[in-house]
Amino acid sequence: MVAERKFDFISIDGPYGFDVSGTIPCARIDILPYLPSCLNESFCIVIDDFERQGEQNTVKIIKNILMQNNIKFSEGVYSGSKDLYLLSSEDLSWLCTM
């Protein structure tokens, strides 16, 4: 079960979709209740399709959760035909500079 495990890598991807129940349309929200407790001290989160508003809104929430828990992180966006967002613990910040 996710709630009982810690992860160093989380990949968030899926078909187009929003959480229509919230006031801010977000996509791929299933991870939110588990943050930050599901993260190892060193971690990397990859979110595909970052060009979409729903994924961008979800990233804002993830960043707020980490900041509220005093977890420092680095971030980067890789653009191509689609965008990919990468967020990592500070010790893996080099991942955000590739």
Image: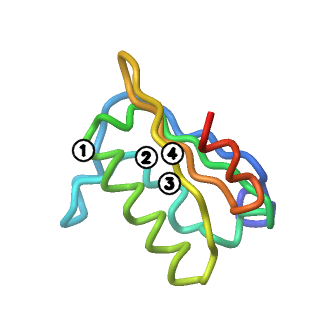
Task: State the mark number for residue 30.
Answer: 3
Looking at the image, which is closer to me, 20 or 81? 81
| Closer to the eye: label 1 or 3 | 1
Image position, residue 7 (x, y; %): 77, 54
Looking at the image, which is closer to me, 72 or 18? 72
The residue that mark 4 highlights is 76
Name the residue type under label 3. Answer: Asp
Q: Could you tell which of marks 1 and 2 lies nearer the N-terminus?
A: 2
92 relative to 81 in the view: left or right = right
Task: Look at the numbered discs 4 and 3 and tell me whether their residues touch, using CB distance below 8 Å.
Answer: no
Task: Look at the numbered discs 2 and 3 and tell me whether their residues touch, using CB distance below 8 Å.
Answer: yes
Looking at the image, which is closer to me, 38 or 40? 40
Residue under the image location 18 percent in, 66 percent down: 23
Relative vertical location of residue 6 with respect to residue 80 in this rendering, above or below: below
Give the CA distance from mark 4 to mark 3. 22 Å
Image position, residue 11 (x, y; %): 61, 39
Name the residue type under label 4. Answer: Gly
Residue under the image location 60 percent in, 41 percent down: 97
Q: Quadrant of residue 81?
A: top left
